[in-house]
Image (cartoon, grey):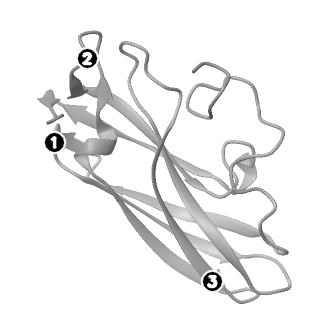
Amino acid sequence: MRGRTYRYLVEKPLYGFGFGLSYTSFASGNLKITPVNVKAGDPVTVEADVKNTGAVAGDEVAELYLTQPKVFETPLRVLAGFKRVHLGAGESAHVSLTIDPRSLGQVDAKGNHMIVPGEYTVSLGGAQPQDAASVQTGKFNVTGRAELPR
């Protein structure tokens, strides 16, 4: 799947996922991850503020991507959640997304779906991975391993 899907695309795409779906602009800020140290199998909550920085009302889709520790054939990024918000010009909203254990998992060389220990990076914003200006990033750590049901 290398080069065929956002999960394995190394190059910067011409247009990020969700690009151009609005007639206004948005910015994200105040990213908060809880907890920052989590046991494998426990959920993680990611929160941020989204603001309409343009002159007209519009909808923003806050996309939450996860970058996992490298093991066997780990994708570059995984869509871990999204939330659509409607905002008037200059209006802000607080969004909260939960990364469930299934989204934290990846497939190992033996075909097992596992959550592996290590540092995970989250990216929250619109039109990712192309529109880096409106994206907030943060990190959390997973301790231990957990095998997920098939």
> Within the image, what quadrant is residue 47 found in?
bottom left
Kind of residue indicated by mark 3? His
Identify the residue under disc 3. 86
**39 to 51, vertically: above or below:** above
Lower position in the chain sequence, tag 3 or tag 1: 1
Three-letter amino acid code of the residue under disc 2? Gly
Mark 1 residue type:
Gly
- Seen in the image, is 79 located left or right of residue 100? right
Above or below, comparing residue 63 to residue 139 in the picture: below
Q: Which residue has dot 1 on it?
A: 41
Q: Position of residue 121 (x, y in %)?
A: 45, 38
Q: Quadrant of residue 21?
A: bottom right
* Residue at 27%, 51% in the rendered image: 100
For mark 1, give the secondary structure: loop
Relative to 25, does residue 14 appear above or below in the rendering?
Answer: above
The C terminus, quarter of image: top left
Instruction: Answer few, some or many: residues within 10 Å of disc 2's Cα (few below 14, many 20 plus, some between 14 and 19).
Output: few
**Which numbered disc, 2 or 3, marks the residue that appears first in the sequence?**
3
Q: Secondary structure at mark 3?
A: strand
Q: CA distance from mark 2 to mark 3?
A: 41 Å
Q: Which residue is mark 2?
A: 111
Q: Above or below — where is 62 with respect to 51?
A: above
Left or right of 69, for residue 15: right
